[in-house]
């Protein structure tokens, strides 16, 4: 396997990490921002509800998207295992 192919595989792995972490992070940020907005409009200065909203939003996104996340990760792992014998040469 050439160096360029190895670099391309590592680059695809890093991009996959970014793509797979983006939906839960966006959901958590959106839920936290909405909770901060509502608490600010109500005049409540407590940080716990916004943190709980972020936690629940991220967890719910992980729960709902876990089949897609798992299939993408398994597909990448399968491609990695397929190219593994070529690395030893």
Image: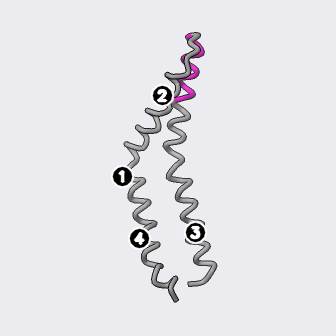
Label 4 close to label 3 by CB (< 8 Å): no
Please name the predominant secondary structure of the magenta segment in the image.
Answer: helix
Return the residue found at the far bottom.
89
Q: Which picture quadrant has residue 75?
A: bottom left
CA separation, marks 1 and 2?
Answer: 23 Å
CA separation, marks 4 and 1?
Answer: 16 Å
Please tell me how crowded label 2 is: few (under 14), some (14-19), or many (20+) other residues with Cα within 10 Å: many
The answer to which of marks 4 and 3 sits earlier in the sequence is 3
> What secondary structure is marked by label 2?
helix
* Residue 15 in the image: above or below residue 83: above
- Residue assigned mark 1: 67
CA separation, marks 2 and 4?
Answer: 36 Å
The answer to which of marks 3 and 1 sits earlier in the sequence is 3
- Residue assigned mark 4: 78
- Residue assigned mark 2: 53
Q: Out of 80 and 45, give the one closest to the viewer.
A: 45
Q: Which residues are magenta?
A: 32-42
> What secondary structure is marked by label 1?
helix
CA separation, marks 3 and 2?
Answer: 34 Å
The answer to which of marks 3 and 2 sits earlier in the sequence is 3
In front: label 1 or label 2: 2
């Amino acid at each position: 396997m050439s160096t360029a192919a190895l670099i391309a595989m590592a680059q695809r792995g890093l991009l996959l990490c970014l793509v797979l972490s983006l939906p839960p992070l966006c959901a958590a940020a959106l839920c936290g921002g909405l909770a901060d907005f509502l608490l600010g409009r109500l005049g409540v200065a407590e940080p716990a509800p916004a943190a709980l909203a972020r936690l629940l939003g991220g967890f719910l996104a992980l729960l709902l998207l876990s089949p897609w996340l798992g299939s993408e990760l398994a597909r990448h792992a399968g491609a990695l295992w397929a190219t593994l014998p070529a690395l030893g040469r």
